[in-house]
Image: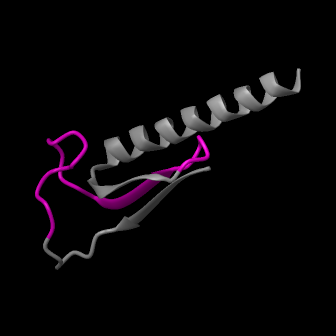
Amino acid sequence: MSRLCFSTLAPCREGPTVCAVCISGPPLFRYEFSDESDGVSADYMKGFCCGRCASTLLTILEDLEQREKARALAGQE
């Protein structure tokens, strides 16, 4: 199971000045990403990202889900 959680940044709170993913845009979100898809302990990442990178992270999550479904279907055949 993989999980991606976003939260907004408090406007008065100190934080990074650039996105931790692309290192160019200003961060808009705090994110936490964990991947337990191989049945082992979770790989865990967290940080701050811009809107464009938030979309990219969602695409990565979608790709992981599609691979997991393909594996499950292949196991049923």
Q: Is residue 40 left or right of residue 43?
A: right
Q: Position of residue 33 (x, y in %)?
A: 43, 53
Question: Which residue sits at x=42%, y=42%?
Answer: 57
Instruction: Specify the segment rendered in magenta.
Output: 15-40
Residue 71: % across, % down? 71, 28
Can you name the residue that lies furthest to the right here?
Answer: 77
Q: Position of residue 47 (x, y in %)?
A: 28, 57
Q: Nearer the viewer, residue 67 or 36?
A: 36
Q: Quadrant of the C terminus?
A: top right
Residue visible at 28% across and 52% down?
49
On whether residue 11 falls in the magenta region, the answer is no
All told, the count of numbered labels is: 0
- 43 vs 19, left or right, is right
Q: Is residue 22 magenta?
A: yes
| Residue 53 pos. (x, y %) | 33, 42
Prevailing SS of the magenta stretch: loop
Which residue is at 13% across, 61% downward?
Answer: 16
Residue 11 position (above or below residue 63): below
Q: Vertically, is 18 above or below 61?
A: below
In the depicted view, which residue is nearer to us: 66 or 39? 39
Quadrant hosting residue 3: bottom right
